[in-house]
Amino acid sequence: MVLMKTIRKMIIAIILLMLIVVSSFGAYLLKMGYDTYQIDREKKPVAMMRTAIIEEVADYVEYEDISPAFINSIVAIEDHRFFQREGIDFVSLARALYSTFIKKMPQGGSTITQQLAKNYYYSFVLTLDQKMAEFFFLYEIEKTYSKKEIIEMYLNIIYYGDGYYGISQAANGYFDKEPSELDLFEGSLLAGVINAPSIYNLSTGKKLAIKRQISVINALYRNGYIDESTQSELLALGEEYAAGE
């Protein structure tokens, strides 16, 4: 009986110690991320982000001149609560953590705003302090800019494979069209490419890009952007496009 009480006390003590360690480490990570955020925002103020991107991107395209079909495809596959949500998407983050650490199937949980922060301030592979800083940038960016401005900036600076940076280069380079002219098939195909441009680029990875496009098309259907008939038509077009390689 005494032994059991002792064991219970030991277990409780271990649990409390673990909670203290976890909370202390979490606080340390937050402090580290906040310090990095403060340093980097001093170098490149969030308030000047859109102006700086417009100056850097010679063929910058505004939101109204980007195909709605492409924007819908991006939102559906990358961040389907983008226009409704504020701040971190905790549902997607929890799902990504569960998939990555429990199911051992790595999955991203970043919102479009976080991806904009990552592309503007950091590199593709983030250090831990930069990943934490990304969360602080998320809130400042969403406080400073509208959702339309955020996705506009994002689509103008990301890489689309085959040497194309920004939506203007990608639309013209892949389809010989202006960004406003992309149809739903082209938009959903291009939306899949950005997930891994070196793998899904259309010069060497067309068949893999079509496989990725299936996920985009299904996301469009799942989130109410297209009906079942359009979903079937797009999937059939994808099969024809892949067969033409």
Image (spheres, helix red, strand yellow):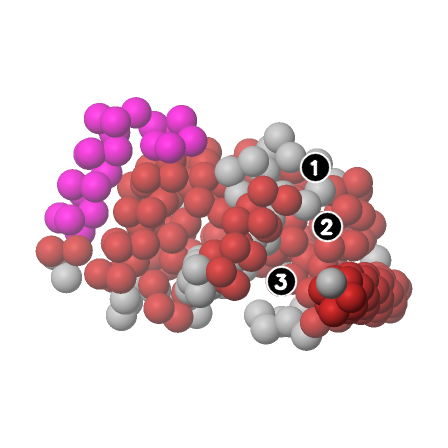
Element carrying mark 1: loop
Mark positioned earlier in the residue sequence (2 or 1): 1
Q: Which mark is residue 86?
A: 1
Element carrying mark 2: helix
Instruction: From the image, give the main secondary structure of the stretch colored magenta.
Output: helix
**What stretch of residues is rendered in magenta?**
221-241
Q: Is residue 238 magenta?
A: yes
Name the residue located 36 percent from the left edge and 45 percent from the top edge. Answer: 216
Say which amino acid is labelled 3. Asn
Name the residue located 43 percent from the left edge and 69 percent from the top edge. Answer: 163
Q: Position of residue 113 (x, y in %)?
A: 65, 49
Residue that carries the numbered disc 2 in the rendered image: 138
Residue that carries the numbered disc 3 in the rendered image: 119
Q: Name which quarter of the figure residue 126 lies in.
A: bottom right
Q: Position of residue 45 (x, y in %)?
A: 83, 58
Q: Name which quarter of the figure residue 137 lies in.
A: bottom right
Q: Position of residue 179 (x, y in %)?
A: 44, 44
